[in-house]
Amino acid sequence: MICTMCWKCGKAIAVPAPIGRAAVCETCGADLRSCRNCRFYSPGSYHDCLERVDEAVRDKERSNFCDSFQLDPRLRSDRPGGTRGSPDAHSAFDSLFGA
């Protein structure tokens, strides 16, 4: 099992490794094996991917068959059921940038 965070709702969840195509977030139902959860996802780059891929994945939020998929280490968590970041961190960011 690995602990990861959902790209959509930020909840930490435990999933079997490797992440299968049918894996979804228990809270919001978002697909976990998607471009949005991949370490190579890079909006604005060629096909929005840092890896050399022949075909663009049209829906970056849906599960796909990409052979390059690797879980984004920034979404790793060591505590299932938590949330990404703390409220204090979010408020500090907001006050710093006036959001």
Image (tube, rainbow, N blue to C red):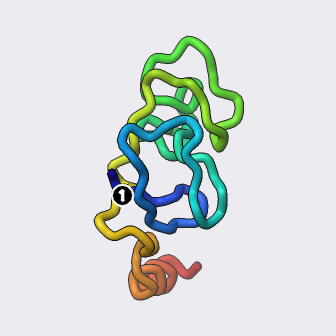
Query: Which residue is found at the position 55% from the left and 81% from the top?
Result: 98
x and y percent of residue 27 in the render? 61, 66
Image: 96 above or below 54: below
Query: Which residue is found at the position 41% from the left and 87% from the top?
Result: 88
Q: How many marks?
A: 1
In this view, the residue in front, 93 or 34, is 34
x and y percent of residue 31 in the render? 61, 47
Q: Is residue 75 rendered to the left or right of residue 26?
A: left
Question: Dot 1: what SS?
Answer: strand
In this view, the residue in front, 35 or 29, is 29
Q: Is residue 70 rendered to the left or right of residue 61?
A: left
Q: Amino acid at mark 1?
A: Cys
x and y percent of residue 54 in the render? 56, 12
- Quadrant holding the C terminus: bottom right
x and y percent of residue 89 in the render? 39, 81
Mark 1 crowd level (few <14, some 14–19, many ≥20, 10 Å Cα): some
Image: 40 above or below 10: above
Query: Which residue is found at the position 42% from the left and 52% from the top?
Result: 15
Q: Residue furthest right?
A: 58
Q: Residue furthest top?
A: 54
Image: 79 above or below 61: below
Q: Is residue 11 rendered to the left or right of residue 58?
A: left
Task: Quickly name the residue at label 1.
Answer: 3
Query: Which residue is found at the position 41% from the left and 58% from the top?
Result: 14
Residue 96 position by quadrant? bottom left
